Image (tube, rainbow, N blue to C red):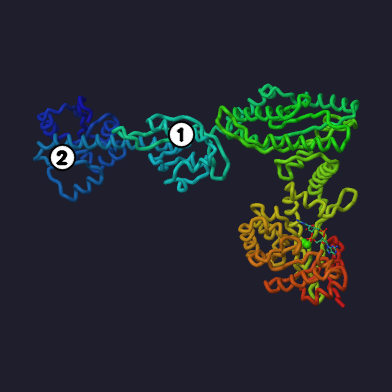
Amino acid sequence: MTPGLPLQLLLVCDPASDELALEQPLKQHGLDFSVERADTLDRLDALLHSECSALLYHYASRTLPLDEVLARLRKIDPELPIILVAAEVSENMVIDLVQQGLSDFVLEDKLARLPGVLERVLAEAARQRESRERHDQLRKFALAVEQSPASIIITDTTPVIEYVNEAFCRNSGYAREEVLGRNPNLLNLGLTPRKTYTELWETLGRGEVWQGELHNTRKDGTDYIEAATIAPVREPDGRISHYVAIKSDITDERRSESLIHRLSHFDSLTGLANRSQMLKRLEQSAAAMQRTGRHGMLIVLDIDGFKFINDLHGYQAGDALLLSVTQRLRDTLTDESMIARIGGNRFAVVVENLSRRRDRAVTQAHDLAELIHAELQDPHFLEQDGVSIRHATTMGLCLLSTEPEAADRLLNKAEIALQRARDESGNNWRFFKPDMQTVVEERAEVESGLHEALEKGRLRLFYQSLYDAEGRLTGVEALIRWFRPDGQMVPPDRFIPLAEETGLILPIGAWVVETACAKLREWSQNPETAELFLSINISARQFHQPRFVESLLKVMDDYDIEPGRLVLELTESVVLNDMGHTEQRMLAIRDLGIGLALDDFGTGFSSLSYLKSLPFDTLKIDRSFVSDMLGSESSAAIVQATISMGHALGLKVTAEGVENKRELSLLRRFGCDSFQGFLFARPLPPEDWAPADQSLD
Ligand code: C2E
Ligand code: CA
Ligand code: CA
């Protein structure tokens, strides 16, 4: 009821009834009101759409039955209070009407109660409206918080997380259940400087709002930077009950800021020569060395993890570190040496005046590299941030001799040596050697050729037969071959390791699986080959790739092959990777019915413990043992022990590389189950391969 304004009452009654009888008690009560009367449905509708405070229904209007009016009310203005005035009402009728929306009733002979009832009903309606409005507002609020693009966390004062919104879950990678009840510092793995936290709690302790940056870590281990506003929430009595944190991810901004800064301040920061100046100087030095007959050295040097330091401590810290490195290099080197910055975190040093004698010069270069490396190992103290930073340094060295050589070639050599040092472990240094160049070039050539081979279908599978102790053909191993456009064949040992390194093994491996399954499908149509198994070699990277088992299943499904016909050969490098994961994956593969063979047994760690715990069904003795067996008693003993051990573990044992009858007869004596080697069959292209048993005598 709005105080001060006259009530607008809507009256529904028959024309014949006495309207004044209802108004009288209200007037007597001193209520300020106006009345509109509805005697048709249209009029009622119109009035319901206008402003009104309550409806009085005088029972019983013949033109406007009560249930009709209630239905109208529910549709148009469900909150409008309605009071029934009637000569008599039964209890059942009241219950029924209240369910339909009636607010209250007054008996005709007790009309004096009407003002009181009206006031109560209006007060109740006002209360409900208010609570509904508050509820609506809260709901809007909750929705806004929940769907806000900013991460929002509410904690108690402990602080224990009581609420996080959707954006928080999205940004942090944590599900709500994983963080509720926990301390928000679960996001902080120590990347935010301690100083920041001290300041944060001091500010909140004073009851003030804190704003700053937090370096947090997601559930998946990646880190991100957030701009955060954290505010205390107070109860009406002033006590702090909660904290609200509102945070947005500014990682990208920080990173691009730092990049822009770096590009625009390059070299002006350190005052060092840049790349092109360095190359010029290198050319002059080379010319000078030809005149003087002295040697020199070019060093290329990387600050490892620089990007990380930049992201973590900000580009100011990154700059300070670069300056500190520059200073150390200046302190370590003589004035004649040139120091240059040739990339974001890459420095180059040109050293002249080493000995005329090459061996002396190499020793001098060696000592100097060691000194520089050691000097840079000490932590750098960055004053303005109050942090100490230790970084690894990787260096590539190239001796400058009296032979004329272009500056960019020299730089390229030092960079190849740097790459080698990094491949070996990082935080060390290497001299360039000509074979590094060859290796680099060869690798690049093999890699691009292999890409092409895969695309143009120049890979083939060859098939080598395996036999049991009676000489019966039991299965075949598929061995990959690469044919160059000129018809030259590249054996797998020359390209599989590189394919592993570059990741090309994944498409290659997928091609092998597919080709093998197509072959099995073909075999299944012919009774002579329907029972054979086909073994394929699976490399570590392929085996551990995320959807390996699913992809196997899919191909087997596509070709509709019986899983028992397929065998995967794994080496110890697969197994040693991550025992838990390997075991799980192998069990999944075995559950599909696929066979598992341990390849090259004896060449690796050959630990019995994993053999026992992993679900292999075949063990393949490496061909080096087989070929040594006749000439070396210890090799023969190893082969014999391996066969007995394999049998004790319930495995079938295959010998690879059987080249002659004497090897075969000894292996048979030892109880070997299965044989593979040039004695029986070489790996053959599919068009030459045919199923045939052997006579072993
Ligand atoms: P592996 O799995 O040990 O394959 C057996 C190797 O021994 C084959 O060499 C085969 O030609 C050779 N061999 C068979 N019988 C004899 C014999 O009596 N005497 C001698 N001296 N050698 C014999 P290949 O085909 O050059 O394969 C070399 C390695 O390349 C394989 O060793 C395997 O580790 C890998 N490889 C081959 N194909 C694939 C493939 O499709 N995928 C993967 N990831 N690796 C493969
Ligand atoms: Ca093999
Ligand atoms: Ca092998």
State which quadrant residue 123 falls in: top left
Q: Which residue is drawn at 64% across and 52% down?
A: 546
Residue at image point 38% right, 39% down: 157
Residue type (three-letter) at the residue carrying disc 2: Val
- In three-dimensional space, the C-alpha distance between marks 1 and 2, rounded to whole angstroms, equals 71 Å
Q: Return the residue at label 2.
A: 85
Instruction: Give amino acid for label 1.
Output: Thr
Q: Which of 507 and 114 is in front in this view?
A: 507
- The disc label shown at residue 198, or none: 1
Q: What secondary structure is found at the residue carrying circle 2?
A: strand
Q: How crowded is mark 1: few (under 14 residues within 10 Å), some or many (20 or more)?
A: few
* In this view, the mark in front (1 or 2): 1
Q: Which quarter shows the C terminus?
A: bottom right
The vertical placement of 476 against 30, above or below, is below
310 on left or right of 9: right
Q: Quadrant of ligand 2?
A: bottom right
Q: Earlier in the sequence, mark 1 or mark 2?
A: 2
